[in-house]
Image (tube, grey):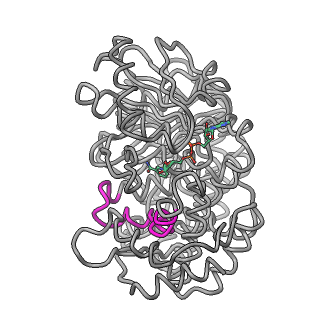
Amino acid sequence: MGGLTVVIGFMGAGKTTLARELAAARGVDHVDTDALLVQRFGRSIEEVFDAEGEPAFRAAEEEVVLALLDSRPPGRDPVVSLGGGSVLSERVRRALGDHTTVLLDVPLDLAWERAAGRNRPLARDRDAFAALHAERHALYEALADAHLPQADPGLVVRADAALRALADAPPGTRMAWAHAASGEYPVFVGRGVLGMAVPGLPGRAFAVTDSAVGELHLASLRDLAGVIEIPPGEQHKTLQTAERVWHAMVEQGITRADHVVALGGGVVGDLAGFCASAYQRGLPVVQAPTTVVSQVDSAYGGKTGVDLPEAKNYVGAYHQPAAVLVDTQTLATLPPEEHAAGYAEVLKTALIAGGPLWDHIAAGGAVDDDTIFACARTKLAVVAADERDGGRRQVLNLGHTIGHALEVTLGYGTLRHGEAVGLGLLAALRLSGRTDLRALVAELLDAHGLPTTLPTAAVDPEAIVAATRLDKKRTSQARTPFVLVRAPGDVVHGQDVADDDVALAVRELAA
Ligand SMILES: NC(=O)c1ccc[n+]([C@@H]2O[C@H](COP(=O)([O-])OP(=O)(O)OC[C@H]3O[C@@H](n4cnc5c(N)ncnc54)[C@H](O)[C@@H]3O)[C@@H](O)[C@H]2O)c1
């Protein structure tokens, strides 16, 4: 990676404007390949399309783009924006490998709103436009080193340090820019990213980790000023452990001008994030997740907290990370049963996302780096739409209402969180009336060594129903709202479900 910064994306994404802004901020030139083509043909792209046809245009486009990507003009490297179809050329795709490729994501509806009615040759028919959007999306995704969401005009400038950091990151590292109302941050995903230099972090770095992870992966972090260790396991995600961490923070002289690196699974991430949110009223935390659960889910979105004996995650705070370092290499040391537990969160995320991620998982696809990155981006998109669980974010609770109730009722540690979520997914699919999907998900859980029935028959469904009433989603005396699945990619929150139906869905798990 390195070379030029090249902005790609679908028509209507705003590539030209974004590249121009970035170039201005860097004090370099901006080159737009569509503009070069207009110059070369001496007429508009629409006119070339209509007069000479798309193939003639694509041939000229390939030539112009390759000339630009292969040349390194003297002086400071320009920022380049490419026409939406340039990446159809295999030679262009190959040439992009030497550069930092930035994808500006644009949802279909917004792209259509911007492109339609402007005499764009490929934006004359809504259905054809939608098909092209889906088809091209896969191409863009495969090429992108960095993903930027649609946001305010200053976003690319604020993300620039993270874009530049990619040049020195381990080969193959990808970055997604997380954007939520209360904060934004880079998410770096790759092999060896624990050792990369993250731009913009204040002061000294202090790691919080559990003793098992510390022994295996602490040495990968660079320039630590201190380390605080907690014992591993959900049973230590408590206020008592948090208090011990706060005391250790005082002892080590940590100040608000420093930052914490939470190295570990979801327990460390939630607890260290919570400690960071409250210590001296808040210091930055970098999430460095090392389990599948945390890499696909818990490290993003800023929810932190600890359990109470009465209920899970009952005390906590929203505290967005300053950065997330997802080193997929750390998963090599993760025990098989933890991989399995993480698979339940992957399934949940794939059901929420639908599309290519669901297709991959439903076909029995492996949880590879691409899957982890896709899950991360799914969660980031949901959180961007609703940071504080007011609405859409509740879909992330799919399978968790009954999952959490099982954990509480059976006693923390009896079921792993992921195992409980897998069972919760089955119950949620039953409540959704999706027998077919329930069967497929049960098959996938089973194939990954996850339970599809409760470990003990001695479970009282009424006790589980009672425990769902303690779910934090319940805000009045009404029943706890459920998240249900209409279809993969079409998941709805806030659904009212009768207690009897919940009991039935739980009883089915005991069978
Ligand atoms: N904040 C959120 O949005 C959110 C979302 C989902 C889950 N969670 C929380 O996450 C927690 C579960 O996280 P988890 O499943 O990661 O559990 P965990 O943090 O307890 O980790 C599981 C076990 O794996 C070990 N481990 C971690 N990384 C390892 C590695 N690379 N190699 C070897 N061993 C390793 C740990 O020491 C631990 O024993 C729950 O408390 C849950 O509530 C939070």
Q: Is residue 395 magenta?
A: yes
Q: Which residues are magenta?
A: 385-406
- Extreme residue in the front direction: 458
In this view, 362 is above or below 36: below
Q: Position of residue 313 (x, y in %)?
A: 39, 51
Q: Which is more toward the observer, 260 or 158? A: 260
Where, by quadrant of the figure, is residue 359 drawn? bottom right
Where, by quadrant of the figure, is residue 383 drawn? bottom left
314 left or right, relative to 407: left
Residue drawn at 39 percent across, 73 percent down: 466
* Residue 174 appears anywhere in the view: yes
Q: Position of residue 388 (x, y in %)?
A: 29, 55
Q: Quarter for ligand 1?
A: top right
* Residue 46 appears anywhere in the view: no
Q: Position of residue 190 (x, y in %)?
A: 63, 36
Where, by quadrant of the figure, is residue 481 drawn? bottom left
Q: Is residue 429 magenta?
A: no
In this view, 194 is above or below 237: above
In this view, 503 is above or below 337: below
Q: Position of residue 500 (x, y in %)?
A: 44, 88
Residue drawn at 43 percent across, 35 percent down: 30
Q: Which is more toward the observer, 26 or 488? A: 488
77 left or right, relative to 387: right
Q: Which is more toward the observer, 99 or 123? A: 99
Quadrant of the drawing holding the N terminus: top right
Residue drawn at 53 percent across, 56 percent down: 84
11 left or right, relative to 318: right
